[in-house]
Image (cartoon, coloured by chain):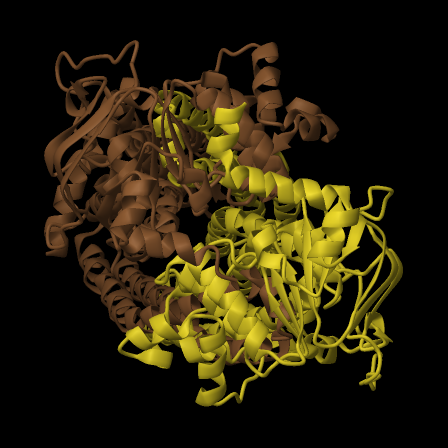
Chain colours: A brown, B yellow
Amino acid sequence: MAENRSHSVFRPLMRYVKPHIGLLAVSLLFAVISVAATLYAPILVGDAVDLIVTKGDVDFLGVRDVLIKLGIVVGITALSQWLMTLCTNKVTYYAVRDIRNDAFANLQRLPLSYIDGSKQGDMISRLVSDIENISDGLLMGFAQLFTGIVTIFGTLGFMLSINVRITLVVVMITPLSLFVARFISRNTFKLFRRQTEARGELTALVEEMVGSAKTVRAFSYEKKAEERFEKDNQTLRSVWVRAVFFSSLTNPCTRFINGLVYAFVGIIGAFTAIGGAFTVGQLSCFLTYANQYTKPFNEISGVITELQSALAAAARVLDIIDEPCERPDPEGAVVLKAVDGSMSAENVYFSYVPQVPLIEDFNISVRAGQHIAIVGPTGCGKTTFINLLMRFYDVTGGQIKVSGVPVNSCTRSSLRSSFGMVLQDTWLKTGTIRENIAYGKPDATDDEIMAAARSAHCHSFIKRLPEGYDTVITEDGGSLSQGQKQLLCIARIMLSLPPMLILDEATSSIDTRTEILIQRAFTKMMQGRTSFIIAHRLSTVRDADCIIVMRSGHIIEQGTHTELMEKGGFYSQLYNSQYES
Amino acid sequence: MIKLFRYLKNYKLQSVLGPLFKLTEACFELIVPLVMAKIIDVGIKNEDSGYVLKMGGVLVLLGVLGLAASLTAQFFAARASLGFGTELRRDLFRHINTFSHKEIDEVGSSTLVTRMTVDINQAQTGINMLLRLFLRSPFIVIGAVIMAFTVSARLTLIFLIASPLLAAMIFLVMKLTVPLFKRIQQRLDKTTLMVGENLSGVRVIRAFSRQKDEELRFRDNADELLDMQIKAGRISALTNPCTYVIVYTAIILIIWFGGVNIDAGGLTQGELIALISYMNQILLALLAVALLVTSLTRAQASSQRINEVFAMQPSMTDEGNTEVTPDPDAPAVAFENVSFSYHDNDEYALKDITFTAARGETVGIIGGTGCGKSTLVSLIPRFYECSRGTVRAAGVPVEKYPFEQLRGMIGFVPQKAELFRGTVRENLRFRKQDADDAELTEALDIAQALGFVKEKPEGLDYPLSGGGKNLSGGQRQRLTIARALVGRPEILILDDSASALDLATDAALRKAIAAKTDGMTVFIVSQRVSSIRYADKILVLDDGELAGTGTHEQLLECCGLYREICHSQQYSDKRGEGQRNG
């Protein structure tokens, strides 16, 4: 199963490496050269040592020649090592950048249902840490693995050329280290999983207790929080100590086996030398090889673990890239122009999950300039309505028409730009206030921006900020009050003035005095513009041309205020409760 | 990082023994070439098989001893580094808990969470590496130099030149790359920010069809990141080749001058090989260092961030405050000429506020966005320290109370409905940890939350996911109100806590609070006149100043601003008519 997954990940991953395949080949070539040169150096050292036998028996001329050769070989090694790293770096960083860009680009095209259904933190970690993992583990790991394998075969070849018997000894003992590493990692795996769980617990606690620090203060919960924290902290420690200790056994154990290899090569080499089939220089060179041969084995076990986790990371990233995106606009899709503001829904059916039908056979016909109110208790699914109007989700049956054109046959961007939307979540991006207001119209002039700000009544507070319109809004508008953020969102709409409006509780956190000013601006703006208003204040929707009443996701009533009041249904109940105190 | 070493103080023994055993292991490893030299010089030369076997046995023994030593070292290193991490984590958590709202506003809680988790883990890994691996390399280098000295004092000169040269080279590479790595980290942070922003703002971005521009912005950042990675990579790629060149130059010199020495009879062939092995051991040790440098750099940066948090001191504490005796006849809350500035400057969020709230009174607070309503009520539980004037609770200035006593008197419902992982029961018991189910049910009933809690099959045991995400906004808000009511606080503060409720629920809630909270002083912050019009006393705030105090009727008569607010809400009630008339 896991094997299959790795294969299916490898191929798509290759398409990011492909553009740099030449560079990769060069890098592998340099790897072979550098390994060969690295292995040749000990032979030269051995040769030199053999020319220096004992007092009075030193061939200086020969030594000089060998050393010059050694110098050249060392130079080649260093140079090819450097070039190899540069090439691998380049391939890696470019491939990773492309993966990241592709993942992000697809994020922009994914259907809303996918984004709504996934956890934000998880998506972020896929695009950031998982991709870093690919870069560290997969590509660098690949380079390391490749050099390792070349080194193993290279040393093997060199050793065989010197002495077959001793080589066999080395070859037989060394894989022991692999087994030991395997054994350890298999046994630590469980410990690591428990450690990850314990760490997750503690992180969740910290996120709550520090993330909601103000609530913790309000209830003097600090001591209790510390008790809970200390308990989890101690649990984590005891699990973690074991995991760290057992996993750190690998290195000493493999080193011990290397030591054994070294000892056996020494003993058998010495016996062979006594027998005269072996020079001292050859023995010295063999000893170096034995070390070099075993080294990649130590690394390989580490590299393989890293490769595995990198492959898992890659699979998670590729999931995003390969996730089918929103159905593209159909060939010859209509670009909505000069929208008159009429809208109709005919036999519309919709559900998020097939098992739970939400909107069934919904019909409405809205003439240009009419105001539609959507009301209902909290969580009744009013946002579903926006989702369908803006085509964040597609209807499952029937059709919605804007300006007489079925929304499914026009381009999404032209449809969406015919609506001005103010959502309950005031979203502002990191950037200056100017950029935020001009978000819907990036080429707006300063005058236009300020005019929009004035009509949304935020010009005065913006002026009071230290940098005025160039004030940078930090993460999620942190430094602004909720009301101010909402005002900015309104200014953003004021600037582009689309023919239709969607107002989602847009005024819920703005005080009534400001609200009335906004309302005035809205009233002006709404004149001649079809508007869909979602609000708790029934008074503001009383004059709507049509009221849609929703409850637990369903549209249950529909009509004008008078009609609904006469009907004496849910709406009239809702409306009357307002005047009880 | 050095500043954080104090967290090793309970693990002094382990942190000394760890490296010490590492040193022992290094020593054993360093003896190996000497033994090999003996095998060559004595065993092979004299063709003494017995000697070779004996020395071979010594080699195996050295290996076993090395293994034992290094296992012990790992054990101590794990104990010490985890002890370090655990204590550091606990202390930082405690330290953060002393922060007042002011510090939390300044740093932001998400930053604190990162420092508590990611940064501490990095520092802990760094310490473990340091104890376990990093110290090994200098030991080997120094040890190799010393061993070389025992073999040949004159040739050691080459070691003495090569070693500092290697150290300088590694230091230089680090110095050049560390700032680059920092900038790479910043770019990665920006990537995180962009992805997060694009996910939370997906509807707005698509509404404005700005996907392409977001993509371009992301690409720009990715290109910058790439640029820096390549640049940093170019420099750090030099480490290994340079090390290699220096070590082999030294080996060439050793062979040449070694040859000269042997020719003169001052050195044996075996000893020459030993010297070369020592040089090779230095090479291997240093290559390991290069691998560790990155993770140590990260640990260093994390430690800095942790220390920043430790360096922050809470702007106010309740240290030295002992339990006070409230005056039963004094008003529940009294403000005396209170002014408050968030940034200790002339920008006052509240200016010269004076009022009293008698026991059992309901006080409504109304005013425009940013006029200081929430600020005012957050001075009562002393979330912030007032800049001038005195806030009294039950006759005693709030700064005289221990936090626990003061906040224990108050039930606070913040604007943001924050709930925690755990059951409904656990969440409700925040104020009073031993509250029984009858008390909880009563609180739920007043908060209009009993209905939906009862509907859940688990009832009070209904598990909430993080932040109460499995409830609707209105349900969350009602639970936070119930949470504040448990244990019947003397003072209840509702900081615009009904914003997510529909009007019917809001009205029922107000009715229940009025009817069932006898003797409780209630503060209601709201922007709706309807929420506060029946309060015993209404405070009208205008840009931090008290524009009027009184009942609804009184204020209608004498407070222009209040009339305007009422008018505006009346106006909005009859918007359509106004439109038609106008």
Residue B232, can we see it?
no
Is B51 located above or below residue B130 in the figure? below
Q: Position of residue B343 (x, y in %)?
A: 79, 47
Tell whether B124 sits left or right of B50: right
Is A92 located above or below residue B488 in the figure? above
Is B117 located above or below residue B228 in the figure? below
| Residue plotted at (54% across, 57% down) | B416
Q: Which residue is at the front of the view, A223 or B119?
A: A223
Is B439 located above or below residue A487 in the figure? below
Residue B290, can we see it?
yes
| Residue plotted at (49% across, 75% down) | B446
Tell whether B487 sits left or right of B579: right
Q: Which residue is at the front of the view, B154 or A494?
A: A494
| Residue plotted at (31% across, 24% down) | A416
Quadrant of the image containing the C terminus of chain B: top right
Q: Which residue is at the front of the view, A50 or B532?
A: B532
Q: Position of residue B20 (x, y in %)?
A: 59, 73
Q: Position of residue B175 (x, y in %)?
A: 64, 38
Quadrant of the image containing the N terminus of chain B: bottom right
